Image (cartoon, rainbow, N blue to C red):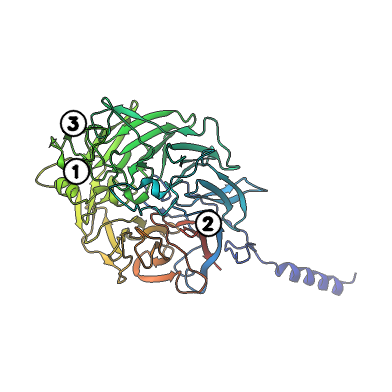
Amino acid sequence: MNRNNFIILILIIIAIHGCKKTPKTIINNNNNTPPYVNNQHISVLTQHNDNTRAGLNNQEKVLTTFNVNPKQFGKLFTLSVDDQVYAQPLVVGNLPVGSGTHNVVFIATVNNSVYAFDGDNGKLYWKQNFTVSGMRPPISQDMASSWCTPYTDFMYNIGIIGTPVIDSAAQIMYFVARSTDGTTFVQYLHAISLLTGSEQAGSPVKIAASMSGTGDGNVNGVVSFDPRRNNQRQGLVLVNGVVYISFSSHCDWNPYHGWILGYNAKTLQQQTVYNDTPNGENAGIWESGMGIAADAQGSLYVVSGNGTVGKSAPFNNPATSNGTSENKLSTDPTDPSGRGESAMKLTPSGSTLQISSYFTPANYLDLNINDLDYGVMGTFLIPNSNFYLTGCKDGNLYLLNKDNMGGFSNTTNLVQQTVPLNASMHCQPTYYLGATNEFVYVWSENDQLRTFLFNRNSNTLLSTTFTSSDSGPAGGCGADLSVSSNGSLSGTGILWASYASSGDAGNTPSPGVLRAFDANNVNNELWNSNQTPGDNVGKFAKFSSPTIADGHVYLATFSGQVVVYGLK
């Protein structure tokens, strides 16, 4: 080969190789076949990302304030399932399922089904149903009573409701499924393989509990867990080898109590039983579906709703009592045996939980009488601080020192800070750490989106708030919020909001909308699902926050699907 021909050959080889494209981290999935490799493998293993419940994924490297817009961002595909989705979708990155490893999204439905889909292209890896053989999921008509007829908190099936929790190291998911034959009602804790959906050793375990007490529904001085009336609404938590499950009620249908039950994550043996009103009534743990917050030491942080505060007179007709705690004789509101209308720090102690700190508002009696539950809003621990954000249906935010919450005073609230809002607080708030500021976001029903600066010098929410001009959600449900960012890098902080665009989602399935805002300036809306035909959400899934992971937003709906958004 002469020199000129050799040079020509070299130039051809360089040209051919120079035309090859380097794989990008952007996913184009209109045909369920991504042409690019997704190099992100972030996991979301529990409700609102981690046990603080702050709702921040600060490892998102694809979605930014520059590319989340109607031209570049939108609906990629949908994941079809067999019923409504109340639980927040969870994601495990780089899971060895199918051939190779994949980012897998897990979805639980009210029909007691769990699905494992490829989070990047929608491929179904497995599906399992966990209704007890010969039974069905409970339905809303099973909960109708003199307290609320018709019962509209749920429209039909009431199977898996609380968001599961995942142990990624053990490759196990934990969740509660409910079943009935119309007479007998049962709830089971399941531990299943992430790879196949198969039950693990000891799973499932029937949920049951009892303890000594003279409270509502007691039989011979024993109060027992009622699997029909106790509603497993909050997300589960896994901390220090224990899976904790909390319970509220269906429409305040007595008798019920606020229970927290703990199970050994390896053996599924019950090791913790706690009841917040064993000698009283009610005090369900609601928090708009957000999970129990926990710290690294294993302490739990919860807020209870309407119920007995302190001691209560014995229930004279315990099996049938429909009395309410505000009409019972209550003495010594500081007595730990009754902790309705209270925030609590609960520390494991033997086979139960010990109240190591608490706060009960001075006006707890008025809250009870007027159905203004303290525990209605989702709560979270402000990351890397000693502070716990809570909210009450009377419109007050309470910022608490998690180790010294304030106790009870009949004259004043001895808390870190009280912030009054004109809102009912059925919502899931969130948090963002920006380059120069820390933000807390709250968007209640019938109110504007509110942004508070958290000041590390005073450890308070600054009284000057940034408020959007949008009137936001109406009816009985506020917005469910999450934040994504690439650390505190400028131009990456995005606040995601899901809510009903019309109607009263508290009682009726309603059209939903997903919106994205600049997390540093919520008056700058980047995108919303109603701007472009084909991006629509379907029916809003109340109390299920958007899950942001690996360049995608996974949004639960009541339309029998999870919608997946990303860069087009």
Where does label 1 land, which residue? 360
Q: CA distance from mark 2 to mark 1?
A: 41 Å
Q: The C terminus is located in which quarter? A: bottom right
Q: Nearer the viewer, mark 2 or mark 1?
A: 1
Numbered label attached to residue 138: none
Numbered label attached to residue 314: 3
Numbered label attached to residue 550: 2
- The crowd level at tag 1 (other Cα within 10 Å; few <14, some 14-19, many 20+) is many
For the residue pair 401 and 555, the one nearer the viewer reads as 555
Residue 534 in the image, given as x and y percentages of width and height: 52, 71
Question: Going from the N terminus, do you reach mark 2 or mark 1 first?
Answer: 1
Residue 515 in the image, given as x and y percentages of width and height: 41, 66
Q: Amino acid at mark 2?
A: Asp
Residue 433 in the image, given as x and y percentages of width and height: 36, 56
- The crowd level at tag 3 (other Cα within 10 Å; few <14, some 14-19, many 20+) is some
27 over 319 or under it: above or below: below
Residue 95 in the image, given as x and y percentages of width and height: 59, 46
**Which quadrant would residue 296 be assigned to in this image?**
top left
Observer able to see residue 234: no
Q: Callout 1: helix, strand or loop? A: loop
Q: CA distance from mark 3 to mark 1?
A: 22 Å
Q: CA distance from mark 3 to mark 2?
A: 54 Å
Q: Residue at x 28, y 41 (%)?
A: 254
